[in-house]
Amino acid sequence: MATTREEVAAEVEAVARTREARDLILAEVSRRVVGQTEVVDQLLAALFAGGHALIIGVPGLAKTTLVSTLAQGLDLRFSRIQFTPDLMPSDVTGTEVIEEDRATGHRGFRFVPGPVFTHILLADEINRTPPKTQAALLEAMQEQKVTVAGETHPLERPFHVFATQNPIEQEGTYPLPEAQLDRFMLSARMEYPELEDEVAVVRTTSGPPREPVRKVLSPGQIRDIQDLVLRVPAADHVIRLAVTLVRRTRPADPSSPPEVRDYVAWGAGPRAAQHLVLAAKAYALLHGEYTARPEDVKTLALPVLAHRVVLNFHAEAERVNGVALLQRLVERAA
């Protein structure tokens, strides 16, 4: 973080602005999506930490509305792709078309950008398209660029993929490979709303049209916050906690508990620890803190680890709940 008095004052002000922006964004989102504060915080943490997020929930929970509202409140360009079995990679990245100059008669190729050229890309039901099309997002997610016909096209920051999955309907789906799942910083799980929240949802959606979402942050301000997250300090014991939690998900690691050795086939890799520390830094900023704390790591451990841990056939046979297993792992962490 900063060293001079002026730099310290500037960063203290930046932290306060980030906390204020978080509250304003929550207020705007809550006008469209009721009772999902925890999920919004997780998505904001991923976005401000420069990562991507997987949103898991049954149909009708307003996953698409949540992402589009968030994009509006952040004044970001938004594209939505409905992933289907016949979707082609070029439908995601773009393609080259032949174009003729009428004056000279010369023909050449011109690149037509696909929907991936945006700030927030909603990959709706990403597991409904074959692996070849899923893989079209890998380069964009990891390197923020797209290569078509040997030519590289950079993507503008901020660029984030928010993908949705339906956990109950698996017929006709193509599960994401572990390599692609690992590119998602976290997985946010949307649950059924509480009674009063559901009443509020029905009341607001069955009434007159709602007012437009107010814009809270510009792309430039978001980039500034993302740079600020990288400067947020994390003490050695916080980093060690994140690494320890990740290592305990690996059945071959000496520190893993018996239930992990019994029921886990593959644990999380080093990228999970990196993502966990970055997300904890962003989460701390969102709540007005100046440094990442152990409680921030524990709060985000489950969203960061849940989609990265693969259970074995013993777990399936005994109907072991992977989320509950990880929850116990986090609760026992020092």
Image (spheres, rainbow, N blue to C red):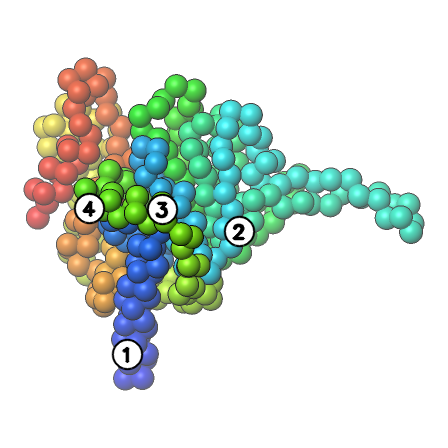
Sequence-first disc among 3 and 2: 2
Q: Mark 3 and 1 residues: CB-CB less than 8 Å, in contact?
A: no
State the residue in front, 30 or 251. 30
Seen as rendered, the residue at the extreme bottom is 5
CA distance for labels 3 and 2: 28 Å
Q: Which residue is mark 4?
A: 196
Q: Secondary structure at mark 2?
A: loop
Identified by mark 3, the residue type is Thr
Quarter in which the N terminus is drawn: bottom left
CA distance for labels 4 and 2: 36 Å
Q: Secondary structure at mark 3?
A: helix
Q: Choose top left, top right, bottom left or bottom right for residue 278.
A: bottom left
Q: Choose top left, top right, bottom left or bottom right for residue 319.
A: top left
Q: Mark 4 and 1 residues: CB-CB less than 8 Å, in contact?
A: no
Q: Which residue is mark 3?
A: 205
Sequence-first disc among 4 and 2: 2
Q: Which residue is mark 2?
A: 118
Q: Local crowd at mark 2 within 10 Å, few (<14), some, or many (≥20)?
A: many
Name the residue rendered at 56%, 49% in the picture: 117
Q: Position of residue 82 (x, y in %)?
A: 49, 35
CA distance for labels 2 and 1: 34 Å
Identified by mark 4, the residue type is Glu
Name the residue rendered at 41%, 42% in the picture: 64
Left or right: 26 in relation to 253 = right
State the residue in front, 208 or 9. 208
Q: Which residue is mark 1?
A: 8
CA distance for labels 4 and 1: 43 Å
Seen as rendered, the residue at the extreme top is 317
Q: Secondary structure at mark 4?
A: helix
